[in-house]
Image (cartoon, rainbow, N blue to C red):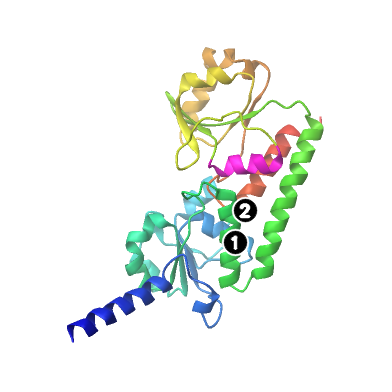
Amino acid sequence: MKCLFICLALFISTLVSAANSSEITSSAFTTPPKRIISIGWDMTETLLSLGVTAIGMADKEGYTAWVASPKLPKGIEDVGARNEPSLELLTSLKPDLILISSHLAPAIKKLGNIAPTLIYDVYSDKRTPYKNAQELTLKLGDILGKEQEAQKIIADTQALLKKNGALIKAANPQLDPLLFVRFVDSSTLHFEGAGSLIQDTVNEMGLQNEWQESTSFWGFSTVELAKIAEHQQANVVLLQSTKPTEFDKFQNSPLWQAMAFTRQNKVHKLPPVWNYGGLLAVQRLSNQLVDIFAAQP
């Protein structure tokens, strides 16, 4: 009898795991889910790229500030922070599907009691965020009955990257490498490199990233502020900072003004773009680079 209970428990555990993991497919649903809650901004963006609006998402205000585009349709419920969504709100919305990344995996049992829960990460140990974003698009397209839309956004993104890369190279055949920089604080910068969505985008466009050193799981290197002085011939592309006022002061400092890239007008500030996002973020970044490096005089 004890053996029977153990086997039954293992069987139930297997069913729960299959219904709440990265292995969920369209076969888990009799009809495509309509009431979807997305905890990650990359998931929310990917849903919108497929013409699907979530009923709930995490941190709408942060999305507006950091992702910016596509704009959120009206009526989406904010379910709390991305690292700690409200289980009470999630339950009250009665979702058919919940989308999370693996940082919320410890809560998979609780979330799975509310609705089938898909875990997926654009950033993973594979260090291929662009490919992962494509796979996420295909997976959601399969689950939501949006296969054609998924294939189209993938094809459109690939075509756009090739076109935009060609535009930039035609306008700037001798373009110096790009150095993607995020100001962290008065002594620290992040340089984007291998394993980042930015690196993958630049690669697909046929452009060159200045930073070739080792990077973190998230595709950036944390460096001292003075490190940027070693890359004065690069085109400096500034990413959105969490401390814009502090960075504005630094840009006006004698040290920054003395840099060759400053004197040669090779410092470029990007509008908000979520470089941990999906294919629409890739498109947005690529278009922003065209606006900078292939703009008509």
Query: Looking at the picture, how far across and down is residue 68, in whole percent?
Result: 58, 49
Vertical position of residue 11 compared to residue 285: above or below: below
Q: Is residue 222 left or right of residue 129?
A: left
Q: Which residues are magenta?
A: 195-206
Magenta stretch: helix, strand or loop mostly:
helix
Residue 25 seen in this snapshot: yes
Residue 26 found in image quarter: bottom right
Q: Is residue 283 left or right of residue 112?
A: right
Residue at position x 48%, y 59% in the image: 120
Query: Looking at the picture, how far across and down is residue 230, in whole percent?
Result: 55, 18
Vertical position of residue 226 compared to residue 166: above or below: above
Residue 252 seen in this snapshot: no
Q: Which residue is mark 2?
A: 279
Vertical position of residue 218 compared to residue 133: above or below: above
Q: Residues within 10 Å of mark 2 (few under 14, many from 20)?
A: many
Residue at position x 60%, y 68% in the image: 141
* Mark 1: amino acid: Thr
Disc 2 and disc 1 in contact, CB within 8 angstroms: yes
- State the SS at label 1: helix
- State the SS at label 2: helix
Vertical position of residue 253 compared to residue 168: above or below: above
Q: Which residue is mark 1?
A: 137
Residue at position x 75%, y 42% in the image: 164
Marks 2 and 1, how far apart at CA? 8 Å
